[in-house]
Image (spheres, grey):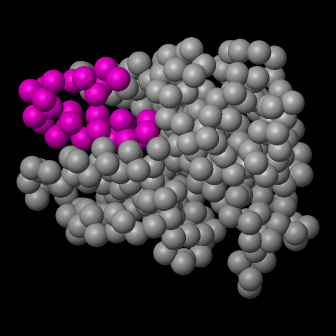
Amino acid sequence: MAPTETVLARLLVRRGDPASPQLVDALRATPESALYEPQTRIPLICCVALFELSRGEPRRCLDVLADQLPGDLSPEQLLYWVWDALPSAAAAMACLGGHDYDAWFDSLLVAAGPATSARKRVARALADAELASVRAQAVLPAWRALVELGDAVPAHDRAYALYRCAKAGLESTGHEPAGVDQERGEVGRDTVAAWMAESGALAAQMGAAPLLGRLTALARRNHLSQGSIPHQRGASSGSAPAEHGLTERERDVLRLVADGRTNAEIARELYISPKTASVHVSHILAELGVETRTEAAATAFREGLLEASHA
């Protein structure tokens, strides 16, 4: 599997493209003989891990990474390549909310060494921000610290960080009329709206439909105007759209997700392929603005989506 195909797969995953499961499957099938060099192997496993995270499978994401890292990499190789795995690993650990992988993650941090370049500083800031909530640290300052790294932050990471700033700001108070209360570390809705607008503009430029979905869901839940958030392109095909942007087919999938079914079980139940089931699950997570299947189920029950699907 050529490095360019790994880059393409990563792009498609972030765009929520229906072709991403097939391309990721091709990555998984890459012969071991072709993965000798870390510059081929590590980006590939990081892409597969990102895919697992995108479809609400944080434990599988971590298992993919832990199976290969630190692995047989030399200390010199680890100093360079571990950084690529840290953000997805931290995001998955935050989704799980526990500490099962703490020792493994800390060993990666030791192997990675100090953040001596812009690329490493961005990766460390992103990982630190993802883990802030489970480590009882202030969440909003951690995400703002990433944004404040400026041009060193890749566009998708910046868009995502701005979304997380907005989410953290709304969760802290969200009631001030404008600006930032420096003394209390709170933000007003005008500031939140500006973060969301910039995030949405960047996401639209990249075609990052899952991130646009999370922005829309965040605005909807907090009764904010959605006018500055571009519409998603390439939404899942199926029946006419229903509440919360889900099609009838996706509501069927959501019901099975809430029952704890795997993608393979969903596929059998609905007579679709596992790849199609995976695409539906990814779109559901984006539309509901959540990171895991458990959160999707909780949101569905809380907002009456599952009741509606049985009507």
Tell me which residue sits at (83%, 44%) in the image. 304
Is 302 positioned to the left or the right of 12 in the image? right
> Residue 186 placed where, x, y %?
75, 74
Query: Residue 214: image x %, image y %?
Result: 68, 43
Q: Main secondary structure of the magenta part?
A: helix
**Region rendered in magenta:** 25-52
Q: Is residue 230 magenta?
A: no
The percent coordinates of residue 58 (x first, y second) are: 45, 49
Up the image or down, 126 lies above or below 81; here it is: below
Q: Is residue 32 magenta?
A: yes
Can the viewer see residue 195 in this picture?
yes
| Residue drawn at point x = 39 percent, y = 46 percent | 61
Image height of 88 relative to 54, above or below:
below
Front-most of residues 155 and 222: 222
In this rendering, position of residue 178 left or right of residue 129:
right
**Which is nearer the eye, 85 or 253?**
253
Q: Residue furthest bottom?
A: 183
Q: Quadrant of residue 40?
A: top left
Depth check: give the residue in front, 152 or 142: 142
The residue located at (55%, 27%) in the rendering is: 266
Q: Nearer the viewer, residue 42 or 28?
A: 28
Question: Which corner quadrant holds the N terminus?
Answer: top left
Task: Say above or below: 163 vs 46.
Answer: below
- Left or right of 278? Residue 88 is left
